[in-house]
Image (cartoon, grey):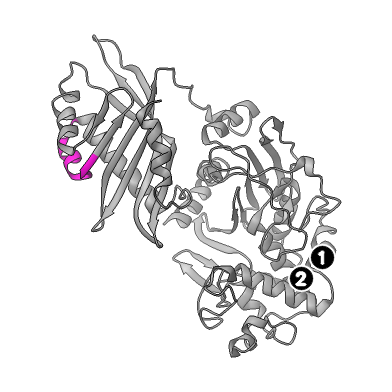
Amino acid sequence: MKLALLLIPLLLTSVTTSAQVNRTSDLFRTLKTKDSLLFNVGFNTCDISQFESLVADTFEFYHDKAGLTSSKAAFISSIRDGVCKLPYKPRRELDEHSLEVYPLENNGVLYGAIQMGTHRFYAMENNKPEHLTSVARFTHVWLLNDAEWKLARELSYDHHEHEVNPAIDEDLLFKDKKETERWMAEHRIPALGIGYIKDGIVQEARVFGVLEKGRPAPDNAIFNVASLTKPITALVALKLINTGQWSLDEPLYSYWTDPDIADDPRAKILTTRHLLSHQSGLPNWRGKTVDGKLAFDFDPGTKFQYSGEGFEYLRRALERKFHKTLDVMAKELIFEPLQMTDTRFFWDKTMDETRFAKWHDGTGNVYETDKTFTASGADDLLTTVGDYCKFMVHIMNGAGLSKNLYAQMISNQVRIKPNKYYGLGWWVDENIGDGEYALVHGGDDKGVHTITFILPKSKQGLLIFTNCDNGTDIYEPTVLKYLGKQGQGIIDVETK
């Protein structure tokens, strides 16, 4: 077996790695820029200074055809005196869709990253037009020293010649099933649910791809949508407030006080407004604290901190007051009126498991399904594209709330950053173009990435469901495809 292929599993198991980072993260963008400097400038134009500045003094290069280059000096010499003096000049091109970045941490402190992907090499030989000479995979190990990223190891392997797949026909994307699923395959997305609303009417509610290998996904595939549960829970509370049965600003302690914080006076000032706007002061999940107990991180109402615990706290308070479980209240107030017949909070006898979109990692392996059997106010809602689109249209059209309460739902409860704040149950992206704003919420768990956008003024909406770890990779092109200029406005708000 080739040396490089033997080294890869050893390399990846000898360091502490976290999950693959989002493509919009600072780390991903920084290392993509480093890759561009190394190849687009250094290799493609023979700018040796780029190699001098980016390559670590302890650099080693493993190549499955050319063998081992064991020093920085030898590597730079091979470029300067070898590649750059060939009668034809090779050109390297990155397959951007293949790029992955995994952080390396030591006790929570970032010290490096692994960057992996596929690249192609082209050349002009004997005055022929430029043509493909090889395709290969690469693994880079970057180390962070004194705030400077240096390339410590490069592995280049699986070199072979083949024709590049034809480019995706953008005009057919989301219109032609075969072309859309070829695009999904390039991004390693097993199943993709798309819901599109125009002029307040659902124009598209489709699912592409497979539930798992060999099992095509039907349009009524059932997805676990993770934190897209929270807008449902929020609307249950708001509908009860709307009818005077519940209060937005009444302290909750008379209905529910978590035993872990019973002795903390801040528990007596906690309100539904604090919980719905993520200003509760509670952590996302108590399991991440040292003793595993719930505790306040700060005083309620003083700042934003996303909290699944907050929505679970609200669920318990509602259930204590009304002597009904959250799923029963949601069924009465939302699911039955909107005919969301395929939506449930947990696995029960009515769940059609044959339609479930199984969870996948970034390489296509199936995760074991963690089935829940009680309702959570924060996570694990099971639904279809068609059902959640009905919910989105309901929100778009006022959600059955009074004008004053709806205005509070979409108003600035706490500022996150310029042009972005949190309302009651929704993020709100401002100034996305043509005087429009967007209500935004996502859901992210193991093997799950989902997101929804509602544009109330123009009566547009977009829903994206995926069943894999790298589902966020296709958010940006999908948003641009459906929402155009305003989609670009959303992306600008979300990524800046």
Q: Please report whichever mark, 2 or 1, sits nearer to the chain's N-terminal start.
A: 2
Q: Which quarter of the image is occupied by the N terminus?
A: top left
Decide: is 72 above or below 258.
above
Q: Residue at x 86, y 50 (%)?
A: 350
Q: Amino acid at mark 1?
A: Leu
496 lies left or right of 351:
left
Please give the name of the residue rendered at 18% of the width and 28% of the height, measured from the top-left corner.
78
Name the residue at 42% across, 48% down.
Answer: 102
For the residues labelled 2 and 1, say whether their Cβ atoms are less than 8 Å apart: yes
Secondary structure under the numbered disc 1 in the rendered image: helix
Q: Residue sitting at 60 percent across and 90 percent down?
A: 265
- CA distance for labels 2 and 1: 7 Å
Q: Quadrant of residue 313?
A: bottom right
User: Which residues make up the magenta segment?
Assistant: 46-59
Q: Position of residue 128 (x, y in %)?
A: 28, 10
Name the residue tied to disc 1. 333
Residue flagged by tag 2: what amino acid is it?
Lys
The image shows residue 490 at horizontal and vertical percentages of: 51, 53
